Amino acid sequence: MSIENLLLILMFSGVVTGIVCGARILIVLMLVPMFIAFVGMIAGAFDGALFFAIPERIFGVMTNQVLYAIPLFVLMGKLLEHSGLAEKMLLSLASLSQNKGRSLALAVLGTSVIIAAATGIIGATITMLAAIALPALLRAGVSERLSSGLICAAGSLGQLIPPSIVLILLSDQISNAWILSQRELGNFSPEPISVPHLFSAAILPGLLLAGLYAIYIIFVLRSVTPKGDQDTIEKPVNFSAKAVMVLGVIILVPLSIVFGFATAGEAASIGVLGIVLLMMKTGNMPIFKKAFAETVELTGVIFGIIIAASILALVFRGLGGDESVSALLSNMPGDAMGALLVVMLVIFLLGFIIEFIEITYIVIPITAPVLFAMGIDPIWFAVLVAVNLQISFLTPPLGIALFYFQSVSKIRAVTLYTAILPFIILQILALMIILGFPMIATWLPSILI
């Protein structure tokens, strides 16, 4: 084994070990590669001049126009969360279920898809659903296990259904990988993969996954006996006003991006403005201050991880890792499909221990150019990755959705792990369906973009 490959193994082992031990991800992603690069310089396996590219990479991240939309979408979600508008919409739409177990569960699924797509923040959606919908579902006769699994699964759907921070981050990395692979093949003017491409591509897969959840709910809740008070969710006095307006803003934002009326940043700005106008009657400045403060904090974490991951990718390439991965994937049985399945398996396994941002900015730059050069469709691949990342939100021990749910409920961890198992199976089934039928992901972009 060469010294370069040994250092690569040590680098990834160090990163995984640090994350599993609970160290801050940002620090791990920066210090471990830097240390490995220093050892590589001593051993003559790494060119220290590559470090001069770090400021350029940081500047590139901070001036990336695709990433401009992230803080705006985060702010939109935080405003919806703290203003109570999302909560009012949930109460309004769920009240139409007439408080019957199966109807209420389907209403919670539908409204959580809408709210999750609006906030784009798993924590906000799941904590709200756990506080409002969980007691209602239990009183309507839905089991604790199914209610918990439904809230965790439905609350994380917003990371697949546009507008989604996951899709914005993916569009950046997929486009870079696509352009790189095409240049290697001699095509120096390839069409970039944009946010509208991925937003339109994710619509049908998102609906497919929500549909699988709905079928499962209908099958399991064939006959449910309500427990206690039938008024599980109080009917609001006025259904039409703010609920409809919030719904309109939520639908307008992704559609304006998909149909090319606005860029992701412009559409997110429209969304923020719409929510602010709906909040004007409250006149509650502490809400704005809290939303802005949390937006700055979360955005800082996201961009910090992106920068740290780009440094790791730089060290990886400096050690010749891209060539090793290219050789490995090119020699996989089954050619392109075999290589694709291996990458999907790696992403699935990493999802147990690493968050979606790190996976996006570490795995995609390493593997995607090779797969695209082998003939894999970039939009199809992006959607497969998005669905795969969707699974990671539910898989223990580091499933983000599970942490948020447990923080606001008294459900035992054992119950919760068994609760989310059927939904993980449904997610894997959705991934397999999209693998077998690529047009689920590629059809809409082909007619809309």
Image (cartoon, rainbow, N blue to C red):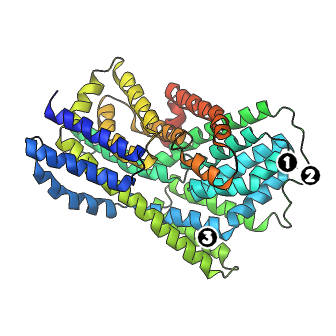
User: Mark 2 — residue?
Assistant: 229
Q: What is the CA distance from the residue labelled 3 to the residue labelled 1?
A: 35 Å
User: Mark 3 — residue?
Assistant: 274
Examine the rendering and report whether any part of residue 34 can be seen: yes
Q: What is the CA distance from the residue labelled 1 to the residue labelled 2?
A: 7 Å
**Label 2 is placed on what type of residue?**
Asp
Which residue is found at the position 17% from the left and 26% from the top? Answer: 1
**Secondary-structure class at tag 2:** loop
Asked if labels 2 and 3 touch by Cβ distance under 8 angstroms, the answer is no
**Secondary-structure class at tag 1:** helix
Q: Is residue 198 left or right of residue 340?
A: right
Count of picture labels: 3
User: Mark 1 — residue?
Assistant: 139
Q: Where does the image place residue 233, in percent across and percent down from the top left?
A: 84, 56
Which residue is found at the position 33% from the left and 64% from the top? Answer: 62
Asked if labels 2 and 1 touch by Cβ distance under 8 angstroms, the answer is yes
Which residue is found at the position 57% from the left and 38% from the top? Answer: 205
**Label 1 is placed on what type of residue?**
Arg
Tell which of 323 and 404 is nearer to you.
404
Asked if 387 appears above or below 340 in the picture, the reply is below
Residue 331 image-quadrant placement: top left
Earlier-in-chain disc, 3 versus 2: 2
- Which circle, 3 or 2, is nearer the viewer? 2
Asked if 223 appears above or below 308 in the picture, the reply is above
